[in-house]
């Protein structure tokens, strides 16, 4: 009997220990940073020059960290490439890199700066965290020497990794994550051999971390959520928006909603590269976002989040993305389908001919159903319903199933799928669904001017239908159910031979 009691006591103690200092909510901050870029990136600069540039960026980040801490933030996320920019060769990035140890070494760089050689950037980030009592998340470059004893060692004798680091409020290095799914142009970095599943616990929930293009992947993005059951994701990104389907704010907020986690997304800011769109997203709501194509300034965002959203009564139920659409009899109308491209993928489209109607459009195994009502059918704007079921092969290979309703760029049907910025047509009612073969479907609605549709205006039913709720007319630019079919992916994203490689 004594033996059987023992584990219970341990469990009680463990619970007590966990609940001490535990917070039900916390304040999250993200900083959209207009990165100061190096003057020269084709040929290597000296280490001193590299550090000078990085310190200029950290000076800006420091102001944001201080301001966030003053407003009570517990954690702040800064963007991918936020300390040195993004256009480099293998050689020209090298002076910017530091050896970043495994967090298991238990290191506070601010207290012990020389323990792992010359690491001024880690020291400064650690001091920022410690001096302001805030978790600081940043993206820097790691270098790891290797030699012929490792047959994958690059000819220059080192691995170079795109790396996220997290320093806790005492300045301790608590997480290091090497980006697994590099984007094709990131020739300055190596792919890590294995996907790293980096998580850590805090008094305000369990965190996972990954970077930019990783969000399209199963490893590590889906794994840290589904298997490690994290509460919040830290997400540094350098994301250039490409309408209609791949804009930062709509895509990231849809991911948070579909995956049921908080997502703290910090983007770089550079309007000529279409880089803007940061936000703090909860599973049940977009808390705050920033999208700015007008100025060249950075922006700090703060919002309160639930530490453990899964335990909340408002936590969204799982959606069956197949149920509704497969119960609908395909609408048969006198439609003539046509083909059109969205970001290198060939969709099957059909035009919405009248101010109200029902359409079904299919491609391979996916059928998309739409029922809609416009306030009026304008002659100067054309909308189409599109379906795509196939492998995307440019800048990485990943399998998609997508249903989308979008405004064509002009009244010429050949432009359906091309980016367009504004819309005057208003949709009073809509219902969009598809016969998806995956439960990973990210629903997004973008309104004229790249604004997010407020959540009160629509709902996602448990049987997988995206429908209007309020009857308020919405100037829809794009509406999409963006599905990822991971089991049909080739082995690793980004390593496949894309069109440009
Ligand atoms: C780039 O060059 C300009 C002009 O020489 C100089 O003023 C500026 O400080 C340099 N910027 C960086 C980041 O080194
Ligand atoms: C090669 O690398 C391994 C592991 O990093 C190290 O133990 C070994 O000493 C190195 N050998 C040489 C010849 O540098
Ligand atoms: C934005 O990025 C481009 C390309 O890297 C660069 O040429 C430009 O100077 C950047 N703009 C600003 C304001 O830094
Ligand atoms: C669309 O379908 C619904 C039933 O699902 C029907 O009530 C409605 O009349 C149809 N609308 C049009 C314009 O065909």
Image (tube, grey):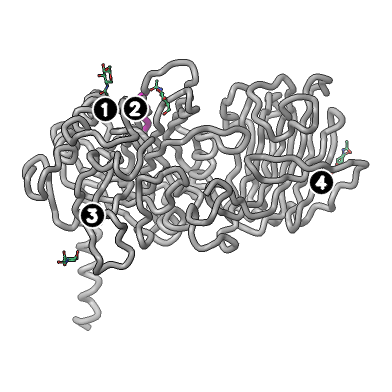
What residue is drawn where x is 48% and y is 48%? 260
The residue carrying mark 2 is 35
The reply to whether discs 4 and 3 touch (Cβ–Cβ < 8 Å) is: no
The reply to whether discs 2 and 1 touch (Cβ–Cβ < 8 Å) is: yes
Q: Is mark 2 within 8 Å of ligand 3?
A: yes
Q: Could you tell me which secondary element the residue under label 1 belongs to?
A: helix
- Figure quadrant of residue 333: top right
Q: Which residues are magenta?
A: 299-303
Q: Which mark is residue 57?
A: 1
Quick one: label 4 or label 2, which is nearer the N terminus?
A: 2
Closest to the observer: 89 or 407?
Answer: 89
Do we see residue 426 in this rendering? Answer: yes
| Residue 182 at x, y percent in the picture | 42, 49
State ligand 4's quadrant: top right
Q: CA distance from mark 4 to mark 3?
A: 53 Å
The residue carrying mark 4 is 360
**Position of the N terminus by quadrant:** bottom left
The residue carrying mark 3 is 144
């Amino acid at each position: 009997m004594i033996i059987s009691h023992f584990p219970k006591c341990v469990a009680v103690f463990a619970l007590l220990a966990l609940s001490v200092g535990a917070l039900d909510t916390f304040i999250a901050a993200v900083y959209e940073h207009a990165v100061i870029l190096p003057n020269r990136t084709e040929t290597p600069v000296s280490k001193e020059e590299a550090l000078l540039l990085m310190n200029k960026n950290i000076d800006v980040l420091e102001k944001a960290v201080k301001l966030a801490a003053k407003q009570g933030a517990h954690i702040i996320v800064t963007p991918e490439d936020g300390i040195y920019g993004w256009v480099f060769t293998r050689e020209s990035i090298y002076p910017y890199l530091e050896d970043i140890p495994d967090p298991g070494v238990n290191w506070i760089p601010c207290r012990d700066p020389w323990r792992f050689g010359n690491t001024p950037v880690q020291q400064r980030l650690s001091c920022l965290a410690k001096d302001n009592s805030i978790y600081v998340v940043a993206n820097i470059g790691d270098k790891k020497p290797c030699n012929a004893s490792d047959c994958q060692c690059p000819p220059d004798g080192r691995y170079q990794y795109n790396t996220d680091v997290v320093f806790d409020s005492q300045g301790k290095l608590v997480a290091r994550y090497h980006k697994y799914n590099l984007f094709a142009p990131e020739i300055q970095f190596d792919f890590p051999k294995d996907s790293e599943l980096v998580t850590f616990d805090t008094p305000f929930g369990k965190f996972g971390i990954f970077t930019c293009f990783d969000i399209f992947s199963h490893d590590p993005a889906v794994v840290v959520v589904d298997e490690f059951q994290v509460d919040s994701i830290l997400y540094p990104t350098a994301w250039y928006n490409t309408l209609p389907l791949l804009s930062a704010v709509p895509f990231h907020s849809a991911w948070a909603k579909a995956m049921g986690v908080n997502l703290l997304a910090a983007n770089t800011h550079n309007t000529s590269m279409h880089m803007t769109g940061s936000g703090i997203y909860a599973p049940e709501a977009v808390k705050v976002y920033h999208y700015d194509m007008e100025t060249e300034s950075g922006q700090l965002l703060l919002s309160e989040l639930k530490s453990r959203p899964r335990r909340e009564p408002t936590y969204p139920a799982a959606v069956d993305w197949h149920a509704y659409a497969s119960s609908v009899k395909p609408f048969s109308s006198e439609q003539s389908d046509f083909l059109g491209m969205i970001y290198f993928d060939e969709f099957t489209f059909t035009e919405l001919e009248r101010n109200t109607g029902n359409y079904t459009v299919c491609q391979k195994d996916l059928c998309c159903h739409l029922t809609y009502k416009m306030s009026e059918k304008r002659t100067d704007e054309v909308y189409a319903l599109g379906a795509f079921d196939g492998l995307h092969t440019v800048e990485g290979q990943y399998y998609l199933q997508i249903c989308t309703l979008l405004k064509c760029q002009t009244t010429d049907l050949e432009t359906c799928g091309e980016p367009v910025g504004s819309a005057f047509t208003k949709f009073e009612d809509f219902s969009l669904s598809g016969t998806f073969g995956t439960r990973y479907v990210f629903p997004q609605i973008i309104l004229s001017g790249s604004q997010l549709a407020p959540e009160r205006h629509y709902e996602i039913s448990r049987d997988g239908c995206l429908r209007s709720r309020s009857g308020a007319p919405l100037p829809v630019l794009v509406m999409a159910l963006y599905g990822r079919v991971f089991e049909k992916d080739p082995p690793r994203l980004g390593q496949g031979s894309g069109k440009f490689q």
